[in-house]
Image (cartoon, coloured by chain):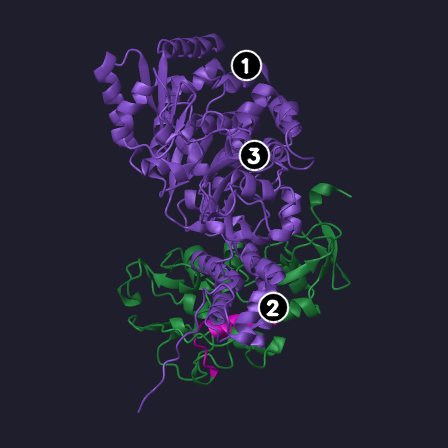
């Protein structure tokens, strides 16, 4: 595959697309698919075929359009977005292409939910058929790879990524350029690139959407990374709970191999890369990099102490680069447009855009990509459309079980790695759960602690037993059976588990408790002192009485 | 100085010490008779850093470091005892006591138990946390040994000695979190294990009375661990 051949494929595909006067795109990512968007697509295809044999109008399945709550979503070439589309609406929609839009199904796109977004990672989401490599190529796909391989040295690629200021999108925010240069400098008989697609935070679905909507983007990012660090083998560790993402990745890998964009001597150069999938068996801790590596090696998925970091001793003891799905997905546009272009977006220390999964008690739930530095208020109230049913906002939870619950006072803070950490939460992988006054913060803390307790691998004592003891106390508080002393013990346990656990899962597991203790202490005290749940969620446990 | 020699100097609790290539903080501390509490570590086996008792403070590093796996670096200043560290250690030992069913007075290892020793050494006099009282099983199917899950602290010494020294890999861990447990083969009764050679190394390295020889009564199970340094030495010489 040469640059010319690649451009030729793109040209041909664009010409084929332009051959159609009208286009109807149906979302076939997991969200809309679960409301039978495949039936909608079939109905639309049949409708179009019955009219003119399908020559004038093209119906295709595309990736996520973002507003998952209003699915199935359909977009048309006359600029309309339709929501809650049923198969029976097909005739009306096809007819409307030559007439007036269907007002009944209209979904407004001139709202902040769409207008505040800046799509870089999701630029092809909802636009291309994720199961066709030609469509990705038609939108400049694999251009960055071909250019990097033929025109750039690995060091130049790394320099470009470093300039961009891209930081790891898995949660910790480690500078990507620095990570790449470390692996590039490490010596070993072989190097590996790994893609962490073991997205496990409750309420988070960014990586799933990217993989389902634009899998080639992740492959291209991995290929560029492998070239930059000198790796020859790659694995995508994807959780088995994402069957559609797995299916589309398999298709994407096969297509890329067939075009010579993956495999041996890519683009006629000496660079070769093989990418395989590894399916996670459902352990949250396998998203931790050393546990993920152990799992790929076929061992029990438990973390090990670092150092040595995977950059020095990773998979099978060799230097290993491991990045998150979204990080890899950000790489091709950075190389296409230059690191400086990316560095202009965002804030001083957090560059670029971040994809968030907006969920919980907001009107618009779904997937959004926003520039770093946007405030929480803009995300919750403008993009999210505020709290439904006239309820009051209480907290927003970022970063999943490793993050914290942030109260109204923090809403005007910019979303960036440092500021979130300062108020006791983390950027995390991008889950954002909004809670209103009907949520009890102790109950929320208990929920996340239960998650950490059941997902603890059991290797280190503080996490294994500490999370159990913390959950026990939180249960006692929500049962109204806890004492003041329990609150003190809870704080001690938080301190212990945070500072002595082996891996990130344990170290961050107290965060939901610590942040709610910090901002919602009054709720804890109401439970303990007055045996009362201000939100009305927790009920006093009925004590079993022994009757003679 | 020739950097390839790999010799480093460091300070542990204010004492100047030297370290050879690859030595960990714990190795050097042991050489200098500086006691660092620990339960999962055992000389001659690989280190997992699981019990978290050997955490130490290293000047300039925010995080506490597990001394059993932290390699010495030139100029390190290590603190092995502090109010904070001792507090954490006491609490971890307490967590281990509340996790299982550790009743010293009826235990074969009473008086020879690493967990009991550590509790005494750290001054754990009573429990602040409630006991869990889990329902755990005892596997007495092996003709010579017994596995009592009630007393297991999941240090995984048995798993490592069986894999690394005996080479049988009969032992492993199954389950997650608080439900983790050590198993033989694919969670079969020990007596039915086909891979177990019956060497008993696991019993001898076990820090508590979780693994014991049959026929031992209260306080009679003294572990014989001399074989491990001997075997390690012989193997090193052989190489």
Q: Are marks 1 and 2 in contact (CB under 8 Å)?
A: no
Q: Which residue is mark 3?
A: A370
The hue used for chain B is green
Dot 3: chain letter: A
Disc on the earlier residue, 2 or 3: 3
Residue A412 figure quarter: top right
Q: Chain of mark 2?
A: A
The residue indicated by pointer 2 is A492
Q: Are the residues under marks 2 and 3 on the same chain?
A: yes
Q: Mark 1 vs mark 2: give the one in front.
A: 2
Outermost residue toward the bottom in this view: A548
Q: Earlier in the sequence, mark 1 or mark 2?
A: 1
Mark 1 lies on residue = A150
Closer to the camera in the image, B239 or A35: A35
Tell me the quarter of the picture where residue B146 sits. Answer: bottom left
- Which residue is nearer to you in this view: A345 or A97? A97
Q: Which chain is purple?
A: A
Left-right relation of B109 to B74: left
Q: Residue at x 67, y 50 (%)?
A: A422
**Residue A27 in picture, x, y percent from top left:** 36, 30
- Determine if marks 1 and 2 fall on one subunit: yes
**Is residue B46 covered in magenta?**
no
* Secondary structure under the numbered disc 3 in the rendered image: strand
Residue A297: x and y in percent read 42, 43
């Amino acid at each position: 595959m040469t640059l010319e051949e690649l451009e030729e494929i793109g040209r041909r595909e664009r010409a084929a697309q332009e051959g159609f006067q009208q286009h109807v795109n149906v979302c076939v990512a997991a969200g809309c698919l679960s409301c039978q968007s495949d039936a909608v697509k079939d109905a639309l295809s049949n409708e179009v075929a019955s009219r003119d044999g399908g020559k004038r109008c093209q119906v295709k399945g595309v990736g996520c359009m973002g507003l998952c709550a209003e699915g199935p979503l359909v977009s048309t070439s006359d600029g309309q977005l339709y929501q809650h589309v049923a198969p029976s609406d097909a005739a009306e929609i096809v007819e409307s292409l030559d007439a007036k839009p269907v007002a009944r199904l209209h979904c407004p796109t001139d709202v902040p939910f769409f207008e505040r977004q800046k799509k870089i990672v999701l630029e092809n989401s909802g636009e291309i058929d994720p199961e066709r490599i030609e469509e990705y190529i038609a939108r400049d796909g694999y251009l960055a790879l071909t250019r990097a391989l033929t025109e750039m040295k690995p060091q130049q690629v790394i320099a470009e990524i470093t300039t961009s200021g891209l930081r790891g999108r898995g949660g910790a925010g480690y500078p990507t350029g620095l990570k790449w240069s470390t692996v590039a400098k490490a010596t070993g008989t072989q190097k590996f690139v790994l893609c962490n697609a073991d997205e496990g935070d409750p309420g988070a679905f960014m990586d799933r959407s990217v993989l389902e909507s634009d899998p080639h983007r992740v492959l291209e990012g991995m290929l560029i990374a492998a070239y930059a660090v000198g790796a020859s083998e790659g694995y995508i560790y994807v959780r088995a709970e994402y069957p559609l993402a797995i299916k589309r990745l398999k298709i994407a890998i096969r297509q890329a191999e067939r075009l010579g964009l993956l495999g041996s001597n890519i683009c006629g150069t000496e660079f070769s890369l093989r990418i395989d999938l590894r399916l996670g068996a459902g352990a949250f801790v396998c998203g931790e990099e050393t546990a993920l590596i152990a799992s790929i090696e076929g061992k029990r998925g438990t973390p090990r102490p670092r150092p040595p970091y995977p950059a020095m001793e990773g998979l099978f003891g060799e230097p290993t680069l491991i990045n998150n799905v979204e990080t890899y997905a950000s790489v091709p546009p950075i190389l296409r447009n230059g690191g400086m272009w990316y560095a202009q977006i965002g804030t001083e220390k957090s560059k670029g855009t971040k994809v968030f999964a907006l969920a919980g008690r907001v009107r618009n739930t779904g997937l959004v990509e926003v520039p770093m530095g946007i405030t929480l208020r803009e995300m919750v109230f403008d993009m999210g459309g505020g709290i439904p049913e006239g309820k009051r906002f209480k907290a927003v939870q970022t970063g999943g079980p490793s993050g914290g619950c942030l109260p109204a006072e923090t809403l005007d803070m910019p979303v960036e790695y440092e500021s979130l950490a300062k108020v006791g939460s983390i950027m995390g992988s991008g889950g954002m759960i909004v809670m209103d006054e009907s949520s009890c913060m102790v109950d929320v803390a208990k929920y996340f602690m239960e998650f950490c307790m059941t997902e603890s691998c059991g290797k280190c004592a503080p996490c294994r037993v500490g999370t159990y003891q913390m959950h026990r106390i939180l249960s006692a508080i929500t049962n109204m059976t806890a004492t003041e002393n329990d609150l003190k013990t809870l704080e001690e346990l938080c301190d212990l588990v945070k500072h002595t656990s082996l891996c990130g899962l344990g170290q961050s597991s107290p965060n939901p408790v610590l942040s709610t203790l910090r901002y919602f202490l009054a709720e804890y005290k109401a439970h303990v002192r007055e045996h009362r749940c201000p939100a009305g969620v927790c009920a006093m446990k009925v004590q079993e009485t022994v009757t003679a | 100085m020739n950097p390839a020699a790999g010799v480093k100097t460091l300070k542990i609790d204010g004492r100047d010490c030297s370290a050879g290539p690859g030595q960990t903080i714990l190795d050097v501390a042991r050489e200098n008779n500086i006691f660092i509490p620990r339960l999962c570590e055992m000389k001659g086996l690989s280190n997992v850093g699981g019990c978290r008792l050997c955490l130490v403070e290293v000047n300039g590093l925010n995080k506490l470091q597990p001394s059993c796996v932290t390699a010495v670096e030139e100029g390190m200043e290590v603190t092995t005892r502090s109010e904070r560290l001792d507090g954490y250690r006491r609490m971890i030992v307490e967590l281990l006591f509340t996790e299982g069913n550790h009743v010293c007075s009826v235990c074969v290892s009473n008086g020879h138990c690493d967990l009991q020793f550590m509790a005494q050494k750290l001054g754990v006099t009573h429990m602040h946390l409630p006991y869990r009282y889990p329902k755990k099983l005892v596997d007495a199917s092996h003709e010579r040994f017994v596995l009592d899950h009630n007393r297991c602290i999941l240090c995984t010494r048995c798993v490592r000695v069986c894999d690394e020294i005996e080479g049988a890999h009969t032992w492993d861990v199954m389950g997650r979190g608080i439900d983790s447990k050590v198993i033989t083969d694919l969670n079969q009764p020990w007596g039915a294990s086909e891979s177990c050679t019956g060497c008993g190394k696991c019993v001898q390295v076990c820090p508590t009375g979780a693994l014991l020889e049959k026929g031992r009564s209260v306080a009679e199970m003294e572990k014989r661990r001399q074989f491990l340094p001997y075997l390690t030495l012989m193997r090193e010489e052989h190489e």
